[in-house]
Amino acid sequence: MPSYSGVWTLAAQYQAVGAGNWPLPPLSGAIGLFGGGNSGANGNVIEYITINSTGNSTDFGDLTQTMGNLAAFASSTRGVFGGGNTPGTGTVINTISYVTIASVGNATDFGDLTVARSDLAGCSSSTRGVFASGGATSGTSNSLVIDYVTIASTGNAANFGDVTLARFGLRGASSPTRGVFGGGYTGSFQNVIDYVTIASTGNATDFGDLTLNVYILAACSSSTRGIFAGGYESTTGGQDTNVISYITIASTGDATDFGDLTVARRRLAGCSSSTRGVFAGGSGGSNVMDYITIATTGNAASFGTLLTARTELAGCSNDSGGVQ
C-alpha cells in the first residue's frame, strides 16, 4: 500500500481508489446533499458540500434514476430522496432511494411512496421521514396525502394523514418534533403553512401564513427556526422572488421577513446545519449557492457553485433541524 503525505485531496482519494489501494475516507461534519434536478442531462446527480465552510460542491454519486421536482430529508446517517417526475417526459414517480451520507457512492432503492407525485415536500425527525402533498398525476391533480418512512429501515411508505390544502410546489422544514409545510399552488398561489407532529400520525393543522403567496420555493431549518426562500410568487401575475422569511417552529403564527437571496430564483433547494442554511440551483439551470446564518436575520451571501447547474433539485443534510 503506497503512502501519501501532505494534504489529503479528493483527487488523491480517487487516485487511491482507482489504483485499488484503499477506500475513500468517510465524510464528516455537517454534510449537505443536493440530488436530482433538471439540467438537460445528469438528472440523477448527487453532490455534497460541507455546510459550515464555503466552496463549490463535489460529486457524491447518482440517484437510482433521473428525477426532477423530488423531495428529500435525512437522519444523521442516511439521506433519502423520493417522488418527483422524469425530466423531459413529466412521468410522475413513486420511487424512494437512499444514500449513506458518510460514504460517497450511488443511491440504493428504499421502497415506494403510497401515491406517486411530484413537487412534494419532505422533512424529518432523527428517525422518521415525511413526504407531503404534491402533484399526483403529471400536475393535473394535487394530493392531500402525507406518508412516512422509518429512515433507518427500507420498505414502502405508510399513510400518515392529510395536509390542510392539497397543493404542489410546497416545501418542508422541521424541528426534532414538528414538520412544517409552506407555500404551494392549487391553481392559484398559496401562502399556507401547516404542520404535523412527526412522531405521531394524523392530519396537518394550520400554522399561519408566509409573507408571500409563493410556490416552488426552498426550505431549511435549525432545531428552532424554519426558513423559506425564493420561489415563484404572485406579484404582477408571477415572478421569481429573492425573499427569505422565517418562523419559530415550536409556536404557530405568520412568517416574518428574514432578508434576500443573492439571486431571485425558483425551483431551488435548501439544506442546513444547526446554524447555517444553504440554497442551491434554481431557475434556468442555476449553479448559484448562497447561505445564511439561521439564528440571525439578513441577506444571503455567496457560498460557491454547484458542480452541475440545474433546477428542480432537492436538498437534505445530516445536521438539519429535525436531526438535532
Image (cartoon, rainbow, N blue to C red):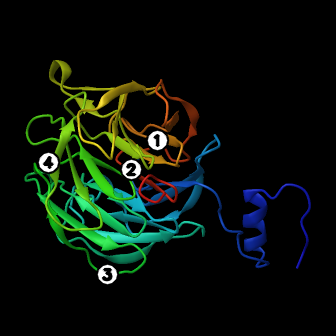
Please report contact status of discs 3 and 1: CB closer than 8 Å, yes or no: no
| Label 2 sits on residue | 313
Closer to the chain start, of discs 3 and 2, is 3
Of the residues tagged 3 and 2, which is closer to the observer? 3
Report the quarter where the N terminus lies: bottom right
What is the spatial separation of the Cα atoms under label 4 and label 1, in whole angstroms?
23 Å
Look at label 3 and name its amino acid: Gly
What is the spatial separation of the Cα atoms under label 1 and label 2, in whole angstroms?
8 Å
Residue at x-position 43% and y-position 60%: 44
Answer with left or right where residue 295 lies relative to residue 148: right
What is the spatial separation of the Cα atoms under label 3 and label 1, in whole angstroms?
29 Å
Residue 60 locus on image (x, y percent): 56, 61
Residue 132 locus on image (x, y percent): 22, 58
Nearer to us in this view, 230 or 204: 204
| Label 1 sits on residue | 280
Nearer to us in this view, 230 or 3: 230
Closer to the chain start, of discs 3 and 1, is 3
